[in-house]
Image (cartoon, rainbow, N blue to C red):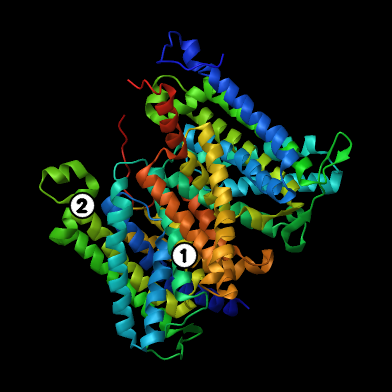
Amino acid sequence: MPDFEWQFTLVLLTNGIMIGLMYALIALGFVLIYKATDAINFAQGEFVMFAGFIAAAAADMAGAPFWVCALLAIAGMVALGFGLERVVLRPLIGRPVIAVVMATIGLAAVLRGFAVLVFGAGTRAIVMPVTDEPLELGPVMLPPVQLVGAAVSLVFLAGFTYFFLKSRTGIAMRAVADSQQVAMAMGINVRRYFALAWAMAGVVSALGGVVWGAMLGVDNQLALVGLKVFPVVILGGLDSIAGAVVGGLIVGIVENFAAGYFDPIVGGGTKDFAPYVLMILVLMIRPEGMFGRRRIERV
Amino acid sequence: MFHRESGVFKTSYAADMALYPLPIAKWAVAAFAGLFIVIAPLTLDEYYVSILNLILIACVGALGLNILVGYTGQISIGHGAFMSVGAYTAANLVTQLHAPFWITIPAGGVMAALIGAVVGIPSLRIKGIYLAIATLAAQLIIEWTINHVPAISGGVQASIQVPRPTVFGTPLKTQTQLYLFLMAFVVIAIVGTSNLIRSRIGRAFIAIRDQDIAAEIIGINIFRYKLWAFAISSFYAGVTGVLYTYYLGIANYEQFQLTVSIDYLAMIIIGGLGSILGSILGAIFVTLLPIAARWFLESFGGLFVSQADLANIIPNLRLILFGGLIIFFLVVEPEGLNRLWRNIRNYFRVWPFSY
């Protein structure tokens, strides 16, 4: 019996880590926007869904190979990111938080309605060019789709960390986030970096859409992944990429353990519930998250 | 008196704070009250009265949410859940104790106010987006709890049948009777909100909205007033939930999901944050939007696409219209329909001598 328990725990743990890394990828899109523009994107899940629809539709209609679909999704989401920043977000610069929150909630509604109108309500599939055979490591079975997803997200998380630490553009973006006025005075084109941040979030969302779409199938339910982003970013801190990874891992592991151990007791659904309880606790104790920067307010 | 004025001639604070700034306002309110309390229920068809009923219910909820968001400046994405708290409280009281409406409605409101105040506790430490996310969590947690605890939800599909209330010995059967019943609560809600806002509490709310640190420095206990704002606002939400349950005849958590919270936020943004008339206009607008869109498409959409496609198009078009309008108002007219109305009124106020 103890031996079986140990194996069960190991399975839950590895699944949690895989899913957690994939959550981190979606949370990254959220963090990028918050880091650079101070805006919070409640439409992140819809971005992911929309990207998934583009990729799946490209595969269905033209029969394009997988990497072409992924590139199309990236191109589409970059265009969408640029466009939305110009039309919706730019006029809201300097307005109260609730304005930006509500604008992205409105955006989420538009994207959800639009995606179903254009692409139809049926579930589409994205087929990755990998085998369906799970990789067996002792008791643990790892589906290759999840492995690819976790790998993609690790690569991009490392890439963006490097980008923000070292590259000229990344440093400029951090400066913009720190103080828009000072950045402007130093000759940084603030608007350009805002647009760039939304475009970069588009790239990340496109990858998230392809990876999650391959795992779950693409329909309007895919947008619900976006609801998981909030516990992840609150746990890690809204403006920290490392926080997104740690938060993603914690949420992934916690929800798998909750599903494994509590679902039989209360009859299901703890998976969606446990991360939020954890998040409330974090908000009460350390609102800026584990790696977030504490903000000092002045009157 | 029924006269025009040629300018603004207020010389005392009392005149400036008066509920009716002009005599004509009193007449206008009386005319609208007459129209909607006497003439509308007597002349309109049952179907149209049922739509008016939906608007009345939405008015109460929108007024409550505006107290929290528009006047106190705290965000809540959890009002749908507070409504469900009121709804299930009332449903359980009715089915288990056969409680009359004058117990269930305050009880639903008080229960929602308690839960709302608990959700409001983090608002001392966190604000803005963090608070938005915390209330979002509250929405999901309350939804889950109601759905998974049979003692609250009645077990089967989490829905409880609730008979219509009995007022002065008459059970409310028709939509028109229900309309008058709901109208009483809307009037109470409007009068209550407008007096609350002009009171000491209301001005403390507004001070907190404008700058909460400054409000604390001038001696406002912001924790207490933030909790009051959450409690009062949730009380309205709870009452809305009870009224909606009576309207539908069933308490079901699916009627109070996240989309409902967003609908109500849309109402106060489209109508105008921090405005009573705005809450009402927003409630009318957001309630009528899907009905108008459906009517329009069913009448004319059949010319272009088949009926089967139409069933798919309508809900999605509604989403697009809805989100698009929220964005439109935020970008173009952040003060909402209320501002548009004020612009029109101010233009005609001293017309034709507008200078």
Q: Residue furthest front?
A: B352
Q: Tag on residue A191?
A: 2
From the image, which quarter does the C terminus of chain A lie in?
top left
Of residues B221 and A254, the one drawn nearer to the viewer in this rendering: B221
For numbered disc 1, what is the local secondary structure? helix
At label 1, which amino acid type do we have? Arg
For numbered disc 2, what is the local secondary structure? helix
Q: Position of residue B7 (x, y in %)?
A: 40, 15
Whether the residues at callouts 2 and 1 have beta carbons within 8 Å, the answer is: no
Query: Callout 1 environment at 10 Å: few (<14), some (14 to 19), or many (20+)?
Result: many
At label 2, which amino acid type do we have? Arg
Q: Residue furthest right?
A: B169
Marks 2 and 1: same chain?
yes
Of residues B28 and A88, the one drawn nearer to the viewer in this rendering: B28
Left or right side of A106 for B198: right
Label 1 chain ID: A
Position above or below: A29 against B109: below
